[in-house]
Image (cartoon, rainbow, N blue to C red):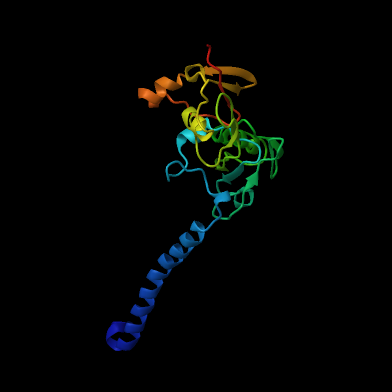
């Protein structure tokens, strides 16, 4: 004999309980998402145009001092610093982090992708078997400098977004009357070597916006004076 035939009232109660159980996890997840959406901007992962971190950020962005890092070691919660747990590591002013088991590590200058491989190598050397590490940079703390013939020369802080040469010049008030826009250049340090990048600003403004160059932390944009 089926229980529903013998105890019709009990069957109704059981169905009600099952219904509650099926909706509760959704409500919990909604509550968790609401909580995460209120996390302070300082610990939000890098986004571009409202999106999540891109592969370009992982392979192009160079970690700087004071950056916030989220480092997840798969299946190792005690070694992980992830956004959901609101645990993070801040890069020290001398470019290092202190990581469990390993100790102090120089991270400034690494891309997130390179740091993932470095941590996997270090953790796999006597600590874990085939570790898998994910690194997200939580905030830009670098800056660029614009000098020469602009109206308000000085530093520009990079706060969670990329800026181009033309944008940087605009942010500094634009060119002075004696500027030579097409002689603009970027001074950039790469692996300890100084690199000069020429920028034809007038050409970019007129019809070649795709050639505008994205600045990297530490870049200096120089606008020379025109020859008369």
Query: In the visual, does 7 lie left or right of 90?
Result: left
In the image, residue 159 above or below residue 117 = below
Identify the image quadrant of residue 19: bottom left
Position in image of residue 215 (x %, y %): 52, 29
Q: Is residue 50 visible?
A: yes
Position in image of residue 65 (x %, y %): 66, 37
User: In this view, which residue lies farthest toward the top?
Assistant: 228
Identify the image quadrant of residue 114: top right
- Is the N terminus in the top left, top right, bottom left or bottom right quadrant? bottom left
Query: In the visual, does 12 lie left or right of 153?
Result: left
Q: Give the residue displayed 63% in from the left and 48% down from the top.
A: 79
In the image, residue 185 above or below residue 48 = above
Q: Nearer the viewer, residue 175 or 171?
A: 175
Query: In the visual, does 180 lie left or right of 9?
Result: right
Q: Is residue 208 visible?
A: no
Q: Give the residue displayed 60% in from the left and 52% down from the top.
A: 77
């Amino acid at each position: 004999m089926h229980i529903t035939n013998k105890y019709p009232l009990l069957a109704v109660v059981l169905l009600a309980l099952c219904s509650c159980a099926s909706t509760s996890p959704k409500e919990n997840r909604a509550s968790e998402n609401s909580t995460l959406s209120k996390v302070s901007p300082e610990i939000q992962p890098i986004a571009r145009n409202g999106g999540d971190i891109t592969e370009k950020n992982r392979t192009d962005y160079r970690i700087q001092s004071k950056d916030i890092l989220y480092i997840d070691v798969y299946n190792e919660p005690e070694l992980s610093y992830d956004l959901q747990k609101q645990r993070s590591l801040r890069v020290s002013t001398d470019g290092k982090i202190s990581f469990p088991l390993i100790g102090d590590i120089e991270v400034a200058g690494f891309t997130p992708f390179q740091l993932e491989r470095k941590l996997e190598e270090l953790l796999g050397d006597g600590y874990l078997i085939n570790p898998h590490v994910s690194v997200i940079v939580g905030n830009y703390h670098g800056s660029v400098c614009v000098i020469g013939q602009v109206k308000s020369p000085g530093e520009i802080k990079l706060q969670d977004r990329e800026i181009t040469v033309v944008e940087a010049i605009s942010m500094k008030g634009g060119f002075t009357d004696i500027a030579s826009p097409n002689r603009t250049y970027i001074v950039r340090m790469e692996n300890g070597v100084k690199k000069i990048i020429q920028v034809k600003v007038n050409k970019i403004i007129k019809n070649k916006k795709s050639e505008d160059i994205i600045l990297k932390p530490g870049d200096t944009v120089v606008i020379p004076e025109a020859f008369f």
